[in-house]
Image (spheres, rainbow, N blue to C red):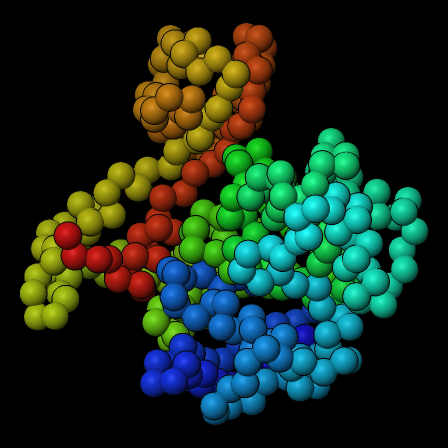
Amino acid sequence: MLITAKNIRVCYGAKVALDCFDFEMVPGEISAILGPNGSGKTTFFRLLLGLLKQRKGDVEVFGTQPGSRHSLAKIGATIETPSLYGHLSALENIQVTAHLKAKEPDNKAIRELIEEVGLSDAGKLPASKYSLGMRQRLALAQALIGEPELLILDEPANGLDPVGIRWFREWAVNAPTTRNLSILFSSHILNEVAQIAQKVVLLKEGKIKFSGALEQLKGDILNEVAQIAQKVVLLKEGKIKFSGALEQLKGDSSHKIRIKTADAERARAFLQSRGYSVTGAQDVMLLDSPAEHRPEIARLLVQEGHDLLECVSQETTLEEHYLSIMGKADE
């Protein structure tokens, strides 16, 4: 077991940051802590690194107490804002990090790492000139120094542009195999978690609202109700928030295929000419079509000469599950 946390309670003065918190993680797993700002995500990461002490409960990382030399030697981490030397380049920042970790990779290995995180074009540009997304990439490279077995990443997609987010998603999904490591990351973006993690913990105000496999989260809540009820009433603080048919609550739950092309307007006209119902805004198109039609739709677009950037199934029920668990703010 990489991480074991049982009945954890962490406080900042009178404020409870984590309460009755349980968590386990096994090697090779990608786990996510999902929740709004202030829910306790970063607090848990600080606890795992020995930067905080719990008031109650037990925590072990690699079979030892958090913050031990044994556990820290096997962890790479980024917490909150990346900490970089602004006057140094990417290579120089990584050299400093390697020295602090008592690792001595040669410059060739560091350049390969810089290339892996997509910063080869940065050259000798000082880190003070980096965008937030570039700083996040450099922080990831620093965390990978020393070939860690566990990577702890605090909001790793923060500041990345859409291309960067897709790059990180693909890198993270493959990393357990290519780098033989496990990843624990935090996010407040549901779709980001859904495309990377195998296991998810939902946190709200320091308390766990859900913990389990992502597929279980997708299927637990409304699907259970859907098998029984035709009508549903939602109550909050003694007041009715919704009353009506279940399908009305779920909204449009038909399967959709999400498509992006280099020329959305031309592709939209083509698909409509083929009888497809196309919705969506700007460069993103949504087709009401079964999942098994996706290969045929992609083939048609490519044959017609369209530059196909994305053609994926889109599920709409995960957000509903999230809101039903975490609650929705009153307007």
Question: Where 291 sits versus 248, above or below?
Answer: above
Residue nearest the viewer, comparing 92 with 54: 92
Question: Where 71 sits versus 84, above or below?
Answer: below
Q: Position of residue 46 (x, y in %)?
A: 56, 73
Q: Position of residue 119 (x, y in %)?
A: 72, 38
Q: Residue at x 90, y 47 (%)?
A: 107
Q: Is residue 101 visible?
A: yes
Query: From the viewer's perspective, is 290 left or right of 235?
Result: right
Q: Residue at x 66, y 71 (%)?
A: 26
Q: Is residue 28 visible?
A: no
Q: Position of residue 99 (x, y in %)?
A: 83, 62
Residue nearest the viewer, comparing 303 with 12: 12
Residue nearest the viewer, comparing 244 with 267: 267
Question: Where 159 sits versus 219, above or below?
Answer: above
Q: In the current view of this chain or complex, which residue is farthest to the bottom?
A: 56
Where is residue 72, by image quadrant? bottom right
Q: In the current view of this chain or complex, which residue is farthest to the left?
A: 239
Q: Residue at x 62, y 79 (%)?
A: 50
Q: In the current view of this chain or complex, which residue is farthest to the front?
A: 87
Query: From the viewer's perspective, is 2 left or right of 233?
Result: right
